[in-house]
């Protein structure tokens, strides 16, 4: 019995050491992120990255390695959504500053949405579009993608694109990469999308009107 007990204790010690090492690595990553990107934004970024890993793991074996469009819509439609994405355009805000579409989860003020080039704001934010897909190819022969663009103090703009199956096939060679601009975020799989609070003038028209999708996969 003593030998058995020693083996069990040794196994537990190895597991505990592994867990401690994992926690240490996470803490080091958090410290590095804070030092590199600023305390608040870096903390949010780290939390978002960990959250994505935890959320996508149970759905698909390799979902975490792909752009969010892919598990949401499948590869063919993800390529189409990227190929039809509108170029970011600046519009004058109430103060006269040129504002580009941004991620409302990270930017709600004019100051962080001021255009500084074709794909970035003056504060280093990426231009962003939130997407919604309506697939009517079986009945009407088209698929419609709506790109919802948010500019602080201006509100939401909808850009709609319709495509046929031939368009889907024509987009087969389009790359779908995380680094591409504008960043594309599928509303169908966005956690808590209906519960974000906005001023009345900026309330999203899509809120409570987008059906959730269970992440799927299509080659």
Image (cartoon, rainbow, N blue to C red):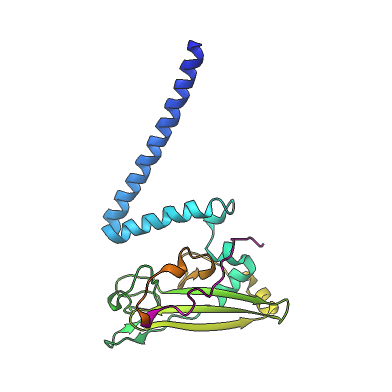
Q: In the image, residue 176 lies at what x, y percent?
A: 55, 67
Using the rendered image of the protein, determine whether residue 83 is visible from the camera's viewpoint: yes
Give the magenta part as a residue range.
201-219
| Residue 16, quarter of picture | top left
In the orientation shown, which residue stands out farthest toward the right? Answer: 138
Q: Is residue 13 magenta?
A: no
Question: Is 21 displayed left or right of 52 in the figure?
Answer: left
Q: Residue at x 61, y 76 (%)?
A: 134
Residue sitting nearer the eye, 49 or 171? 49
| Residue 135, quarter of picture | bottom right
Using the rendered image of the protein, determine whether residue 100 is visible from the camera's viewpoint: no
47 in relation to 208, above or below? above
Q: Residue at x 58, y 61 (%)?
A: 71
Quarter of the rendering occupied by the C terminus? bottom right
Question: Is 63 displayed left or right of 172 in the figure?
Answer: left
Q: In the image, residue 194 lies at what x, y percent?
A: 46, 70
Question: Is 8 displayed left or right of 171 in the figure?
Answer: left
The secondary structure that dominates the magenta segment is loop
169 in relation to 4, above or below? below
């Amino acid at each position: 019995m003593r030998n058995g007990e020693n083996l069990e204790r040794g196994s537990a010690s190895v597991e505990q050491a592994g867990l401690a090492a994992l926690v240490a690595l996470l803490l080091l990553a958090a410290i590095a992120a804070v030092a590199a990107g600023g305390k608040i934004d870096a903390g949010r970024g780290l939390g978002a990255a960990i959250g994505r890993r935890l959320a996508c793991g149970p759905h698909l074996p390799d979902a975490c390695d792909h752009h969010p469009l892919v598990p949401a819509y499948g590869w063919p439609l993800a390529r189409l959504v990227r190929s039809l994405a509108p170029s970011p355009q600046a519009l004058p805000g109430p103060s006269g500053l040129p504002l580009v579409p941004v991620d409302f989860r990270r930017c709600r003020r004019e100051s962080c949405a001021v255009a500084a080039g074709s794909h970035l704001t003056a504060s280093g934010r990426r231009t962003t579009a939130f997407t919604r897909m309506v697939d009517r190819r079986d009945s009407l022969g088209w698929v419609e993608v709506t790109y919802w663009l948010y500019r602080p103090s201006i509100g939401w703009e909808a850009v709609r694109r319709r495509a046929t199956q031939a368009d889907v096939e024509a987009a087969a060679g389009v790359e779908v990469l995380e680094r591409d601009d504008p960043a594309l975020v599928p509303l169908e799989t966005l956690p808590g999308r209906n519960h974000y609070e906005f001023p009345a003038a900026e309330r999203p028209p899509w809120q409570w009107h987008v059906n959730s999708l269970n992440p799927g996969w299509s080659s």
